[in-house]
Amino acid sequence: MKQYSCSALYIGVDGESQQVTIISNSGSLLIKTVPNDQQMVYLPAGSMDTILYFGKEITENQEMYTLDLENPETQIKVSFLLSQKDSQELQNQLRGKQVFYRSSNPRILAQIAPGIQLIQTQDKVMIEKIATFPKTMQDAASISRLGQLKQEADILSLLKEHEHQNIIKLEEIVTDNEYVSIILENCQGGDLLKLLNKKTNKIDIPLVMVNLLQGLKHLHDLNIVHRDIKLQNILFLDTQDGNTLKIADFGLSCLKQQIPYYNPRCGTPGYTAPEVFAQQCIYDEKVDIYSAGIILYNMLTLKNPFGNSKNMQDIIKRNISGLYDENHLASVKINNPLGYDLLIRMLQKDARNRPSARECLAHPFLNQENIVIEDDENSIKNQAQKGIQTTKRVKI
């Protein structure tokens, strides 16, 4: 996104006005005084300390548009007047990069999960993820949820500047006096788990893997590690088109250099790379390759590699060992040797032996005629029966 600058008037507490220049660059907001060019306000991209509110003010002579900046902690508020054109352009520049006051209440269409709902605004349907502000410092659950959502907002704000067709889009970050939320595009096609569990569905496995790995390559090129790749976090705009795949849920994601400091032991048992469980807990982006390998196993076999035990500790023990069930791979090895070869490479217990996303994309399995999961009696009927089951991510 290119830099945008415009003129505005700062309105002081005494009602006096002063000319300023407002500059937006990649989601940051800089306001300088005119003519001495002194910095008045600077908000880095992704800042969640100051809340922006765009409105309009009608005077006897003209209609002016307002930009208010408010810091909830210090109770400091500053106001500026600017033109309608500049107001609209600044909103476009800052959407998804700064926190906005909610300008209107959307219609809630459905509650998807705790803290996640489907909403409809004037022009589109979107997903909203909400975290309430903790009322006391003892409210550990709210503090944790808010911290996780802020971390997700930081990562998604960075990705908004480097968009990719296989990454879910952040539309806006909004708040009121009780909560903060992130607004995401709605992937109405549902997730890959539901797609696998549909009896009458065909899945183009190489196409799904190509799009998943292209998304991961984009993340890894930006030094972002997702850390929770699983069936439920792979969404589609259209279930009939594997090219509409979107990687979602960045609540456990972080920059590579943040791994030791931000919940290093995290993920979903059954998908997590073995090195995450190690005592030293030293790992890198190759954990996402392992998790993507589990997804490939799921699609090729319609089974879970570490079984379907209801005891989470059993799954974790098998996951730590890295000894996936090879019985389900017998027919895959014979009928789909290229798919089998890519799979065992991605599921190497030693991360140093695992290919990168770029190397996976060059594998012959992803450069041949499409392999699909056909309708048959062995297709998974639902999550509760045989095959692939829903799993819950945890801090390990």
Image (spheres, helix red, strand yellow):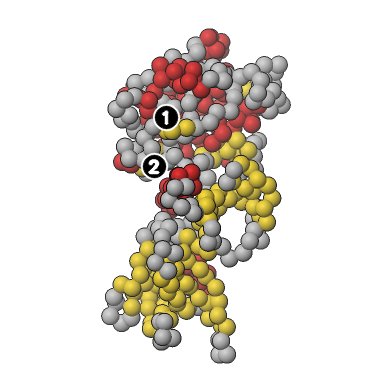
Measure how far apart labels 2 and 1 are at the Cα level. 16 Å
Q: Amino acid at mark 2?
A: Cys
| Viewport quadrant of the C terminus | top left
Q: Residues within 10 Å of mark 1 (few under 14, many from 20)?
A: some
Q: Residues within 10 Å of mark 2 (few under 14, many from 20)?
A: many
Of all residues, the one furthest to the bottom in this rendering is: 61
Q: Amino acid at mark 1?
A: Ile
Q: Tell me: residue 367, above or below residue 6.
A: above
Instruction: Tell which of 264 and 299 is nearer to you.
Output: 264
Instruction: Tell which of 357 and 146 is nearer to you.
Output: 146
| Residue 303, image x, y percentages | 57, 19
- Using the rendered view, name the quadrant where residue 41 is placed: bottom left
Residue corresponding to mark 1: 396
Q: Tell me: residue 301, above or below residue 8.
A: above
Q: Secondary structure at mark 1?
A: loop
| Residue 64, image x, y percentages | 53, 81
| Residue 173, image x, y percentages | 51, 56
Give the residue displayed 55% in from the left and 22% down from the top: 298
Give the residue displayed 38% in from the left and 25% down from the top: 277
**Residue 326 visible in the current orientation:** yes
Q: Secondary structure at mark 2?
A: strand
| Residue 229, image x, y percentages | 48, 33
Give the residue displayed 64% in from the left and 52% down from the top: 119
| Viewport quadrant of the N terminus | bottom left
Residue 219 left/right relative to 301:
left
Residue corresponding to mark 2: 254
